[in-house]
Image (cartoon, rainbow, N blue to C red):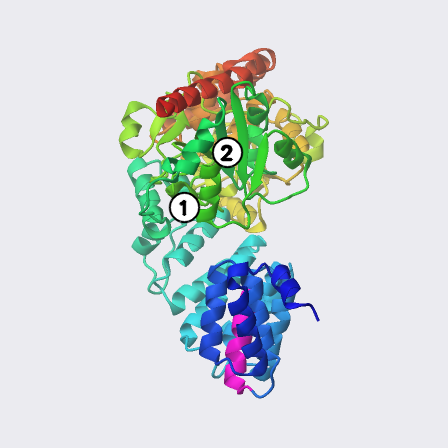
Amino acid sequence: MDSAANRMQNLSVPAELAQEWELLLQRAGAGSLPLPELMDRANVLQNRQLGHAAAALYETWLSVPGHPPASQLVALYNWGTVLGNVQQHQRAEQVYQQALAISPSFAQARLNLGHQLEHQQRVEEALAAWRSVYDHEGPMESLGAEVLGLRTHALNNAARLLELQRRYEESEALMVRSLTLKPDQTDVMQHYVHIRQKQCKWPVYQPFGEVTHNALLLATSLLATLSATDDPALQMGAAQRFVYEKVTRPKEAPLWRHPASVAARQQGGKIRIGYLSGDLCMHAVGLLTAELYELHDREKFEIHAFCWSREDGTPLRQRLLRSFDKVWRINTIDDSNAAKLIAQTGIDVLVDLQGLTSGARPNILAYRPAPVQVSYLGLPATSLLPGVDWILADRFTMPPEYLPYCSEKPIYLPHCYQVSDRQREVGATPTRAQYDLPEDAFVFCSFNNNHKMNAEMFGAWMRILLGVPGSVLWLLADNDWARANLRREAEAAGVDPARLIFAPRVAPPDYLARFMLPDLVLDTFPYNAGTTASDCLWMGTPILTRSGRSYISRMCGSLLTAVGLPDLITHSLQEYEQRAIQIGLNPGRARSYKRYLREEGRQSELFNMPQIVRDIEREFEQLTLAHRA
């Protein structure tokens, strides 16, 4: 057996707690530590980030025979929870199985068992664990929780995992079951709305039971709202609701004012820029920003990444990691400590690349770890986050009439808000036959994600196909349900579903290469193309957009202005349809756009990356110097 000193070292118990912890361990091993005191002391250890020590305490207590079965269940459940918190998922699974051997109907242990199985990528076993709770017949044992809460918890866990597995129809069905049992679950309603958007299941707002249309509207996430309306007031309301419900408001002074943070910023003359993101990998943000980090002037700036991105093993991920002076992986650090790390690093400008999108950590920004905090790219809309004062934009994306609906002040770049990557790899040039496209037809195209589509714009696309005989529409085959629903909508509009041709997902180089095949890309509205618009213009294919009242509905118009094709910007549905039909009936016009992009596009302001980076740096430098002064 290890000595007491070795055991403390292995479990990271600090010296000031050593004597108390050893005494607790002795009492636990002697059977003289009451269960309530065991739980209390284990909680203290966990709160001090000593989860391994708390787990050892439970293990020692349970090694003593003779505890009543009810006490054993409580201790096993808590032990499993602690093990899960310290990422010992296989061990936690074994502990929950011990609890279930004593009481097979112990629902909470089965719920947590599902989580441990999910962490081990054992998807079907996790789903089965949760199914055994929500489909359980007869009484369920618990730790005092209501049976209704246990069932809805199990349904919601299974629905979430099925959504991650892209099994959308199964996921939606479980959400409906959960909301039928308990209609006031706004988080579940939020996912219900968005999963219907992903399936192009229109109308998206489909009430049922006691779940009303109004309740669904109020529960809609900001991301889903951006696809549903370009009304900036409604978008602001969705952001406000998220901030009110999810974002903490620290009472202490901003972290950037703390002496340690001030001292760190005064150590060197270089301006320290920190990029905050969970998407520095094979993601739209990672694809757009790789060259931005590489082009920063290292004579003036020091570039840091504060990152909780997945390690996807791609060359892009490796390139992104190499492009920073320092990468801080904050996956396992809570928001408060992540903010303290950023402050102690002496970051002058913190750029949030996430906003309120999936996986965001807005509470880091709420602690205000940097004197200048800027929103960029990840959320092309106001976030209303209390820690974010600025947003990178241009005069097209943020006209004066839009400003009252934003909490952030715009940092106007002179040409275009969007960076891109001129080093993106392009695959071999494909043929139309490879993708089942007709050789002699006019090919319209939209490779935007399915959740950006809506009934209004799809109806316009169908009228465009009817107005251009023989034309086809090439779409992304995101999922089987979206494909079936879109074909059904086409048929209802009087268009042969065979005129919809679906492209499979392919690797990024091949995805870029196939942009050479269509004649005209049709943008979505109100959620415009961003990365997709940059990609098609880089590859020399024109895109027709409709610009509205919000930042996100004006993104593509900004790109077209910078590339020199403003006549492909429309401002109403009617104008959009008319322009698409005009181009479709005059293929030479589409060819002239392609010729222009081939000859001039890559030399335009849109792809002048060194200049865009200098523009960003100039603005960051001015803000930093103002704060330093």
- What kind of element bears circle 2? strand
- Of residues 197 and 158, which is closer to you in this image? 158
Is 428 left, or right, of 468 in this rendering? right
- Specify whether residue 395 is painted magenta: no
Q: Report the quarter where the C terminus lies.
A: top left
Q: Is residue 248 above or below residue 97?
A: above
Q: Residues within 10 Å of mark 1 (few under 14, many from 20)?
A: many
Query: Could you tell me if residue 142 is visible in this image?
Result: no
Residue 105's spot in the image, x, y percent?
53, 81
Disc 1 marks which amino acid?
Answer: Asn
Which residue corresponds to mark 1?
A: 363
Report the magenta residues as a range.
67-82
- Amino acid type of the residue that numbered disc 2 sits on in the rendered structure: Tyr
As for residue 71 lying within the magenta part, the answer is yes
Question: Which residue has dot 2 on it?
Answer: 275
Q: Is 218 on the left or on the right of 333, as rendered?
A: left
Give the quadrant of the N terminus. Answer: bottom right
* Residue 97 location, quadrant: bottom right
Task: Classify residue 307 by image quadrant.
Answer: top right
Image disc number at residue 136: none
Q: Which class describes the residues within 10 Å of circle 2: few (<14), some (14-19), or many (20+)? A: many
Residue shown at 59%/20% (left/top)? 540
**Picture layout, residue 209 above or below residue 581:** below
Main SS of the magenta segment? Answer: helix
x and y, in percent, of residue 165 in the image: 59, 54
Relative to 146, does residue 584 appear above or below in the rendering? above
Specify the quadrant of the image occupied by residue 234. top left
> What secondary structure is found at the residue carrying circle 1?
helix
Looking at the image, which is closer to me, 110 or 530?
A: 110
